[in-house]
Image (cartoon, grey):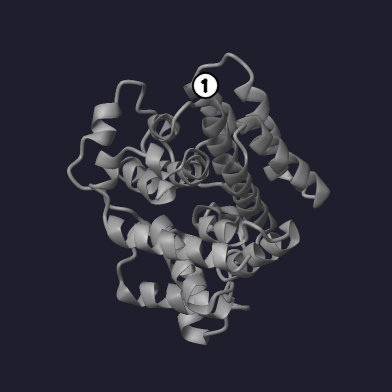
Amino acid sequence: MGLALGDALGAPFEGSGCLGNDVSDRILNRNYLEYTDDTIMALCIARSIISVRNIDPSDIAENYAKWFLSEDLRGIGITVFNALSNYVRSRDWKSCGVIDFWAAGNGVAMRVAPIALFDLNSSEETLYEHIRLDGWITHKNELAISGAFAVALAIRQAIKSSSKREVADYVKAKLEEFGILNRVYDAVLNAIKLSSENIDDLKAFVVLGISGYVVHTVASAIYAFLTKDSYIETILSLIRAGGDTDTNAAVAGAIAGAFYGCEKIPSELIEKLEDKDEILKIADELYALVMNSH
């Protein structure tokens, strides 16, 4: 729910410049909140997990293909579009993923929440491998996978910890343990550093980045999570900054939702969210699966 609502709130402002600080009414006071491909792909993963009770990239790819062929491609990025075009021709999930400059985008990180939740009690090695399997369908890129892993680690620890700094330190430590000392790791360090400084949010986001580059998304999402005191303020800070507002808010929303819990997400916004009953039902089913399997 945290992911979907962040996605829907940020969607109308994607690609915008800085919106400034006095735009909360524009963001929140809409009659209907429609999500984008971020939520659609996350739900594809969640439905697959519930169906097969595991992470099966061939089944996930088929769910992606059903969506792709429906032509409801709202918000789809170029890497995902090209990868799924390859998949519907070949039906080979191992070979359809894209290898190019754009494959370092945030398309894996935006949808990783169901995997993080399913692997809540699994080893970090299992979590990483499951993320890699899903990511490989669309993004054959080290940074894309590393960024999604960092987000998934944050979601896992946000559920288990009452301290935001513990969440950030856990992500940092696990990236180091796995030898992931690339630009995603640097982004996490930058986010932690800036979160402890008395700096204006908009200036911080200029430093950290707000584009669809996964390094920017990880940095800004973790910074927003660390510096804000509620789910909704976390989301609003990212949307005000502009850029890839839907995905940045979706990623931060997944982390913040895990930390604060659904009861702290404004119910009046949930009521306006597209397919909110189905999203809650899927979340309940995923929760039951995880609790019953451990």
Label 1 CA crowd tier, 10 Å (few <14, some 14–19, many 20+): few
Going 20% across and 40% down the picture, which residue do you hit? 30
Q: Is residue 287 visible?
A: yes
Q: Quadrant of residue 164?
A: top right
Q: Quadrant of residue 158?
A: top right
Residue 206 versus residue 58 in the image, above or below: above
Nearest the camera: 154 or 142?
A: 154
Query: Looking at the picture, how far across and down is residue 207, in whole percent?
Result: 58, 27
Going 39% across and 28% down the picture, which residue do you hit? 18
Count of numbered marks: 1
Question: As drawn, is 285 to the left or to the right of 165?
Answer: left
* Name of the residue lying farthest toward the bottom: 90
Query: Looking at the picture, how far across and down is residue 102, in whole percent?
Result: 56, 56
Query: Looking at the picture, how far across and down is residue 190, in whole percent?
Result: 67, 30
Residue 224 versus residue 9 in the image, above or below: above
Tell me the kind of residue under disc 1: Lys
Question: As drawn, is 205 to the left or to the right of 18?
Answer: right
Nearest the camera: 67 or 81?
A: 67
Q: Is residue 80 visible?
A: no
* Name of the residue lying farthest toward the top: 198
Residue 278 versus residue 48 in the image, above or below: above
Question: As drawn, is 61 to the left or to the right of 176?
Answer: left
* Name of the residue lying farthest toward the left: 31
Nearest the camera: 252 or 182?
A: 252
Nearest the camera: 59 or 207?
A: 59
Query: Looking at the picture, how far across and down is residue 152, in whole percent?
Result: 60, 52
Residue 89 versus residue 172 in the image, above or below: below
Secondary structure type for disc 1: helix
- Quadrant placement of the C terminus: bottom right
Going 56% across and 57% down the picture, which residue do you hit? 117
Q: Which residue, given by chain and number where applicable, does mark 1 sit on? A: 203
